[in-house]
Image: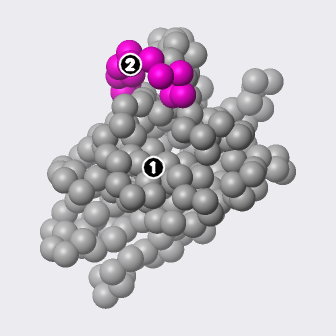
Amino acid sequence: MKAIVPLAMAVLAAVPVYSQDKSDLSHEDSLVLAEARGGLIPADTGQKTPRVPQVLPFPAVIDSVLKDFPNNLRNITGQLVLAQGEFENYASVVELPGAESCIITRWHSFDDTTASWQAQMFRSEHFSEASGRYHALFRQLQGCYLKLVDGSKFYLAGDWEPAKEEAPFTTSTLRLRTGDERYKEVKVEVELVFLVTDWAVHINIVSKKRDDEVGGTDEAER
C-alpha cells in the first residue's frame, strides 16, 4: 500500500485532546451527519457546487469514513486540493475536531486505484508532547466503531505500539471486529513520525485491494 501523501505546504498546529466518547450521537449531531452523507453531490457528476467540510464528533467522523470505504470514499470526497503524478489529494467533507486538515488521497495508477484518508492531528518539536498525543488518540480510536443500519456496532481493536524517541516512525494499528469481507483489508492507524525538525501525529484509514475490486469500473475512468 502506498503511503498517504500529506499536503506539501500544510501547517500543523497543536490541538487539545478530546475525551473518548462511546455514546450514541445526539439528535443534532445525527442531523449534521445525515446532511454530510446524503446531501452531497457525488464526486463524479461533474457539478461544481462546493462541498464544505464539517467538523463532527470524533466517533462520528471515524464511523462516516469507515461506512464509505466500500464506495472508495466517494461520498465524503470534497474539492481537489493537489494533483501530482499518480495521486490526487481532496478535502474530506467530514473532519475530526482539532485536526489541521483531513485529506483523501486517490491513486490512479494501473496497479492501485484505492483511496485513503488521513487526518493531520498534531505537531511539536518535543517528543514527549507528541508521544502523549499519539497515545491519547489511540485510546480514542479504541472507543470508535462502525454502526450498521440495524443498529449493530463493530468496534475497532488493535495493539498499542509504544513510541521511542530514537525511532523516527511508530505506528499502532486497529481493525474492525467484523467478518464483513468489505472491511477485511481496512485498517486504522495512528502514527508518530519525525519530520526534519518536528514530531507529527496522523490518523490514517487505509485499504489495499486489487483494481477490479475497488469502487466499480467508473473509478478508473475518472
Q: Where, quadrant-wise, is the N terminus in this rendering?
A: bottom right
* Image quadrant assignment for residue 123: bottom left
Q: Amino acid at mark 2?
A: Lys
User: Are the residues tagged 2 and 1 within 8 Å (C-beta)?
Assistant: no
Vertical side of 133 occupied by 180: above or below = above
Percent x, y of residue 55: 37, 28
Marks 2 and 1 sit apart, C-alpha to C-alpha, by 20 Å
Q: Where, quadrant-wise, is the C terminus in this rendering?
A: top right
The secondary structure that dominates the magenta segment is: loop
**Mark seen at residue 48:** 2
State left or right for residue 71 relative to residue 49.
right
Q: Amino acid at mark 1?
A: Thr
Magenta span contains residue 181: no
As helix, strand or loop, the secondary structure at mark 2 comes to loop
As helix, strand or loop, the secondary structure at mark 1 comes to strand
Q: Which residue corresponds to the image point at 54% horizontal and 28% vertical from the top-left?
A: 44
Q: Which residue corresponds to the image point at 41% horizontal and 30% vertical from the top-left?
A: 78
State left or right for residue 24 relative to residue 212.
left
Q: Which residues are magenta?
A: 43-54
Q: Residues within 10 Å of mark 2 (few under 14, many from 20)?
A: few
- Residue at numbered disc 1: 105
